[in-house]
Image: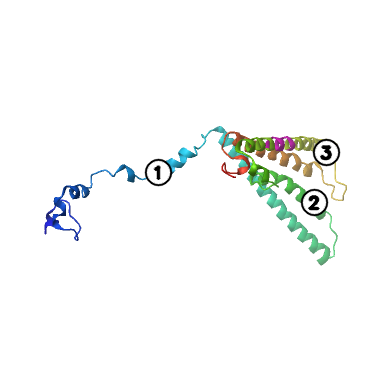
């Protein structure tokens, strides 16, 4: 009966005189703040303090545009591979089922396979799918690893810019000279040659995006954690 009359009802299994003690009266009050040692820890703010996020700005928009272009290249490359396989199936059917001759299929497959390989370069770089030996970066300290990553990206940009420049020069020369393939189909060669400047030009931009995100600490060297080995 006394529990029902008390302003702070107590559990049924507690004695009636429990509320009379000073310590018990403090323990049943609900308006008291919790002790400092039991306050919840905000994991989000703790992680943000340890790993501060880089500020958003024009660089993030620029990198996002390049990444989108690289993904479009990946879709285009996969589509070209798929079309090439369909043409091969059609070639086999015409040659061996209908016993007929083919004119353009072999050359189209060759150009599509080469073009898909070149156009897919920036997407493969976006996924870090190129051949990469990370044994040396794993054993380097953070400063040396950063230096090696910067040098690697600079070399990648230089090579892709070189191939892109001379590829564009080749396309212009083939267009001005009216070059045609030496086959019955006689394809204007500037069309398949255009995969060179497109693929290596976008690869250069992808290397540039990786370089900018690296030097602004938006990414880590070789995508390795700072505490790796």
The residue under label 3 is 174
The vertical placement of 2 against 209, above or below, is below
Query: Is residue 157 within the magenta segment?
Result: yes
**What residue is at 71 percent from the left and 45 percent from the top?**
119
Marks 3/2: CA distance?
18 Å
Is label 3 in contact with label 1 (beta carbons under 8 Å)? no
**What residue is at 70 percent from the left and 45 percent from the top?**
121
Q: What is the secondary structure assignment of the residue under circle 2?
A: helix
Q: Quadrant where the N terminus lies?
A: bottom left
Closer to the camera in the image, 139 or 204: 139
In front: mark 1 or mark 2?
1
Closer to the camera in the image, 43 or 158: 43
> First in sequence: mark 3 or mark 1?
1
In front: mark 3 or mark 2?
2
Question: How far across and how far down the image is residue 184, in percent?
Answer: 87, 51
Whether residue 186 sits left or right of residue 198 in the image: it is: right
Whether residue 157 sits left or right of residue 47 in the image: it is: right
Closer to the camera in the image, 136 or 200: 136
Q: Can you name the residue that lies furthest to the bottom here?
A: 97
Question: How far across and how far down the image is residue 67, in percent?
Answer: 61, 42
How packed is label 2: few (under 14 Cα within 10 Å), some, or many (20 or more)?
Answer: few
Marks 1/2: CA distance?
58 Å
How packed is label 3: few (under 14 Cα within 10 Å), some, or many (20 or more)?
Answer: some
Q: What is the secondary structure assignment of the residue under circle 1?
A: loop
The residue under label 2 is 110
Question: How far across and how far down the image is residue 108, in percent?
Answer: 79, 52
Closer to the camera in the image, 57 or 12: 12
Question: How far across and how far down the image is residue 168, in percent?
Answer: 77, 36
Q: Which residues are magenta?
A: 153-159
The residue under label 1 is 42
């Amino acid at each position: 009966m006394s529990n029902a009359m008390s302003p702070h009802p107590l559990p049924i299994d507690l004695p009636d005189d429990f509320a009379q003690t000073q310590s018990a009266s403090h323990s049943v009050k609900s308006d008291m703040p919790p002790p400092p040692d039991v306050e919840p820890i905000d994991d989000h703010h703790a992680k943000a303090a340890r790993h501060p996020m880089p500020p958003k700005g024009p660089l993030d928009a620029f990198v996002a545009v390049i990444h989108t272009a690289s993904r479009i290249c990946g879709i285009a490359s996969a589509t070209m591979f798929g079309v090439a396989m369909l043409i091969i199936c059609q070639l086999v059917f015409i040659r061996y089922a209908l016993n007929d001759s083919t004119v353009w299929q072999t050359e189209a497959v060759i150009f599509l396979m080469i073009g898909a390989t070149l156009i897919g370069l920036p997407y493969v770089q976006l996924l870090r799918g190129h051949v990469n030996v990370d044994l040396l970066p794993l054993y380097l300290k953070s400063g040396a690893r950063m230096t090696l990553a910067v040098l690697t990206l600079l070399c990648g940009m230089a090579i892709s810019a070189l191939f892109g420049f001379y590829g564009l020069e080749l396309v212009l020369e083939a267009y001005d000279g009216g070059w045609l393939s030496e086959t019955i189909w006689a394809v204007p060669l500037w069309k398949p040659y255009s995969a060179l400047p497109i693929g290596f030009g976008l690869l250069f931009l992808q290397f540039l995006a990786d370089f900018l995100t690296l030097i602004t600490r938006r990414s880590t060297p070789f995508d390795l954690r700072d505490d790796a080995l």
